[in-house]
């Protein structure tokens, strides 16, 4: 696992109720430009949106429970009750927005006090309620396009930083909002197509893999065979032809256009910097559209003085919990059921970025099945038995990460590294790499890449 | 002395909400222009206020003329706690700590049946003092915290004269003018140059050789004033609370425009400007070239300073530097005391908004 987020992130492993399947009338619409801000929508659409949102909220104040432990002071609960009361009495949206913002600001400070792990879940719940009230205030009266996008961002903040409230109500609401945005862009569309640029894809520099260092490949082994030959002996292997049935590799290829259409306006965490061990490395939040524009498309040009562009990487993010359409495009590998853990406890992460993203050599406390969907990655594996030659960081924060730059090692500081045995590969679309628990791995993308990782025990 | 307040008022802690919305904000939730404070819990109190303490949702007015006592305003303020004889207080969101001549007491504000304090401690009167030295939260041999445990010891070697407590750290001013900090350092608020925590008070070496005369803390930042009137700041700057360029402030200003424009300009800004989100070493902040700072106070994410010419400057969450000289039409007493209390929020988009008080924070109630 990478370095813990300094900005808050929802801890993994939380059992997630999937959003109810509402009818999806989404046209498969390949937008090439980002969603255009059009200003106010027609007034006939707004009450319809609000009726959809209020349909998924409690019918009245009495059914809208606000219950918190003693951690949350009575004055804060009073503020929340005020928000609730004014929601159902139909107070002006501007005032309700202020009230919600007060709740958000107070709880946000609690979320930033102490270490993230120790933040009381009650404050994260308060934060989520604040988000919900804010969204209601934004969408109640004639929301403009900007209001809608802000509401979606607010839902995402609640999903990322808050804790599930009212049966994951924010997830339900954000789906409604996203559908509305898609509908609006369909109506507004027209000239977006014309802006499609023919972008020349650079031919990636693929490193030569030595025959004696290659990671073994096997075609679709049976569960029994995988268990016996690879899982139990903790032996790394590349599984071929095991994800060919994924919609992501068939009817819904994950092009940039498709990703924008299913989740362009959603807020995601992005790692900025060459690698997470660097001082300049940081994490930030932005919409998927902004990430694609800034770090996928732009990174194809070098900056005027020829310097290396700053890399952005959508890494280690549970995107599939956030965007159910993408979850439908993948399948849980059967091999995950061979472990001790529950199927529900499998952590699924998205890894989406331009060429040149690097994950420094590190180890994880769980098994990993790394599925490659788009583009190629160069991967190197070291055994945990050789950890002494890999110079892990002494600090607590980075103790699972090696100090060595794998493809440019400092042999003076790290003399034993060159003697450590390793295996390597170029992982291509359709491949799934099994990384046994605690096996050190180094990953560099060779071109624009999208991988899906499954962490299980 | 006259007291003014501005900022968050949803619980009527600045003034009772009335129907005349004369400050431009809906239902009086924010007080934008400073309003004179009246002590008016039961409408009959007309004693002079000698001191003020505030939390996010409440205000306590201290009366020291005649029989000392205090009055509470704000959330659930009417439910009484016996405060006769109280000489000073500390108020938090959950607890109220009262100082009496012979003891300290802590009361739980949310507990409806307030019959007994949840904690109390006798004051050991030493031979060379008539009563407790009231410099709360400092008391002899330690200090009072606003949450349990209410008493924390301090080594007498430190010779503490002033103490301020932030969300996760504490700052102490010694008799020699040295500044000590301890607690969590994840936002650079300790001023030692890194992000690590300190379990025990550690001197801020960057200020060595300079004599500081006052210290104040926000939620995650620290400020201090030297005896020459220079202002030093360090810690978190996400809302501009250090008065240094803040990316958070810049992108917040741009959220007003469309998302697309915001993304673009942010990209351009990045290449030109240097933003500081965490300042781990003390930095000298020049507020105005012409005069010095006399006192300083902090909200959880904003800072305010009073200069020798009697101007109040605020910066941070909700307000960019603003001089209040034009707002106030009364003359300023040269001896300004800025009390740090809690006040509230405002929109960081509105540069013109004078009510710069951060949520949860300590804000400023000004004496005149």
Image (spheres, grey):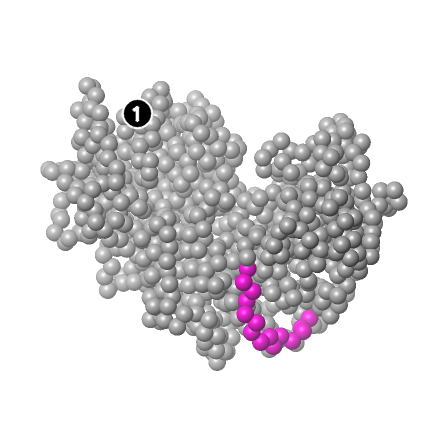
Residue at position x 42%, y 66% from top? A137
Query: Can residue A234 be spotted in the picture?
Result: yes
Q: Position of residue B295 (x, y in %)?
A: 33, 36
Position of the C terminus of chain B by quadrant: top left
Q: Looking at the image, which is closer to me, A32 or A84? A: A84
Q: For residue B171, what is the image quadrant?
A: top left
Chain holding disc 1: B
Query: Can residue B282 be spotted in the picture?
Result: no
Residue at position x 60%, y 68% from top? A36
Q: In the rendered image of this protein, does residue A438 appear above or below residue B124?
A: below
Q: Is residue B359 left or right of residue B365?
A: right
Residue at position x 58%, y 76% from top? A23
Q: Residues within 10 Å of mark 1 (few under 14, many from 20)?
A: some
- The answer to if A17 sits in the magenta stretch is yes
Q: What range is drawn magenta here?
A: A16-30
Q: Position of residue A66 (x, y in %)?
A: 37, 60
Residue at position x 59%, y 48% from top? A283
Q: Looking at the image, which is closer to me, B180 or B243? A: B180
Q: In the rendered image of this protein, does residue A407 appear above or below residue A313?
A: above
Q: For residue A17, what is the image quadrant?
A: bottom right
Q: Which type of secondary structure does the marked residue at label 1 adopt?
A: loop
Of all residues, the one furthest to the right in this rendering is A211
**Is the magenta region chiefly helix, strand or loop?**
loop
Q: Which residue is mark 1?
A: B141
Q: Position of residue B210 (x, y in %)?
A: 41, 24
Q: Looking at the image, which is closer to me, B260 or B124? A: B124
């Amino acid at each position: 696992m990478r370095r813990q987020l300094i900005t808050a992130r929802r801890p993994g492993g939380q059992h997630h109720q999937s959003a109810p399947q509402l009818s999806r009338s989404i046209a498969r619409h390949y937008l090439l430009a980002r969603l255009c801000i059009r200003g106010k929508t027609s007034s006939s659409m707004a009450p319809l949106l609000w009726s959809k949102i209020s349909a998924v909220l409690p019918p009245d104040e009495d059914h809208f429970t606000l219950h918190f432990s003693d951690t949350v002071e009575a004055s804060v609960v009073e503020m929340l009750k005020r928000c609730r009361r004014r929601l159902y009495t139909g107070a002006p949206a501007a005032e309700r927005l202020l009230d919600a913002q007060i709740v958000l600001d107070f709880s946000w400070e609690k979320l930033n006090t102490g270490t993230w792990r120790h933040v009381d879940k009650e404050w994260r719940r308060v934060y989520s309620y604040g988000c919900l009230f804010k969204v209601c205030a934004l969408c109640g009266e004639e929301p403009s396009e900007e209001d809608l996008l802000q509401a979606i961002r607010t839902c995402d903040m609640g999903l990322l930083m808050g804790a599930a409230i009212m049966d994951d109500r924010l997830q339900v609401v954000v789906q409604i909002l996203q559908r509305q945005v898609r509908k609006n862009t369909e109506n507004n569309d027209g000239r977006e197509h014309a802006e499609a640029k023919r972008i020349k894809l650079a031919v990636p520099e693929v490193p030569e893999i030595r025959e004696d260092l290659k990671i073994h490949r096997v075609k679709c082994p049976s569960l029994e065979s995988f268990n016996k030959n690879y899982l139990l002996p903790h032996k790394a292997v590349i599984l071929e032809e095991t994800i060919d049935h994924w919609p992501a590799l068939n009817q819904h290829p994950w092009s940039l256009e498709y990703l924008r259409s299913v989740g362009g306006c959603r807020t995601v965490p992005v790692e900025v910097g060459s690698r997470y061990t660097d001082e300049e490395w940081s994490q930030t939040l932005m919409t998927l559209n902004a990430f694609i524009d800034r770090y996928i498309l732009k990174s194809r040009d070098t900056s005027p003085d020829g310097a290396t562009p700053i890399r952005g990487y959508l890494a280690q993010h549970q995107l599939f919990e956030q965007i159910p359409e993408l979850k439908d495009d993948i399948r849980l590998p059967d091999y995950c059921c061979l472990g001790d853990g529950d199927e529900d406890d499998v952590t699924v992460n998205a890894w989406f970025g331009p060429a040149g993203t690097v994950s420094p050599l590190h180890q994880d406390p769980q098994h990993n099945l790394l599925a490659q969907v788009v583009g190629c990655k160069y991967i190197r594996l070291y055994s945990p038995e050789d950890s002494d030659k890999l110079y892990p960081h002494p600090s607590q924060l980075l103790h699972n990460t090696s100090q060595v730059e794998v493809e440019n090692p400092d042999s003076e500081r790290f003399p034993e590294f060159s003697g450590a045995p390793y295996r390597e590969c170029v992982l291509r679309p359709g491949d799934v790499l099994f990384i046994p628990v605690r096996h050190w791995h180094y990953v560099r993308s060779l071109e624009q890449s999208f991988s899906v990782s499954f962490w299980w025990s | 002395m006259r007291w003014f307040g501005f900022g968050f008022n949803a619980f009527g802690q600045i003034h009772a909400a009335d129907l005349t919305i004369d400050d431009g904000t809906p239902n009086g939730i924010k007080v934008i222009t400073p309003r004179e404070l009246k002590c008016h819990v039961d409408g009959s109190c007309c004693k002079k206020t000698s001191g003020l303490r505030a939390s996010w949702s409440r205000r306590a007015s201290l009366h020291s003329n005649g029989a000392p006592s205090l009055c509470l305003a704000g959330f659930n303020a009417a439910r009484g706690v016996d405060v006769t004889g109280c000489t000073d207080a500390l108020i938090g969101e959950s607890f109220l700590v009262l100082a009496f001549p012979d003891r300290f007491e802590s009361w739980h504000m949310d507990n409806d049946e307030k019959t007994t304090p949840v904690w109390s401690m006798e004051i050991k009167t030493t031979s060379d003092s008539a009563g407790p030295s009231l410099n709360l939260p400092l008391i002899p041999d330690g200090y009072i915290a606003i949450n349990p445990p209410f008493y924390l010891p301090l080594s007498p070697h430190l010779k503490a004269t002033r103490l301020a407590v932030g969300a996760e750290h504490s700052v102490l001013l010694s008799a020699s003018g040295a500044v000590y900090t301890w607690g969590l350092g994840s936002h650079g608020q300790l001023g030692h140059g890194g992000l690590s925590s300190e379990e025990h008070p550690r001197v801020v070496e960057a200020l060595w050789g300079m004599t500081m005369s006052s210290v104040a803390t926000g939620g995650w930042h620290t400020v201090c004033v030297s005896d020459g009137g220079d202002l030093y700041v360090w810690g978190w700057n996400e809302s501009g609370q250090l008065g240094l360029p803040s990316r958070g402030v810049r992108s917040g200003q741009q959220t007003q425009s469309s998302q697309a424009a915001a993304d673009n300009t942010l990209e351009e800004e990045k290449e030109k400007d240097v933003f500081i989100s965490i300042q781990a070493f003390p930095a000298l902040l020049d507020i105005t070239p012409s005069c010095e700072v006399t006192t300083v106070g902090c909200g959880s994410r904003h800072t305010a300073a009073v200069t020798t010419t009697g101007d109040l400057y605020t910066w941070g969450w909700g307000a960019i530097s603003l001089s209040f000289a034009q707002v106030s039409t009364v003359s300023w007493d040269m001896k300004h005391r800025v009390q740090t209390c809690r006040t509230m929020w405002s929109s960081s988009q509105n540069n013109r908004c004078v009510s710069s008080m951060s949520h949860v924070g300590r804000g400023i109630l000004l004496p005149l």
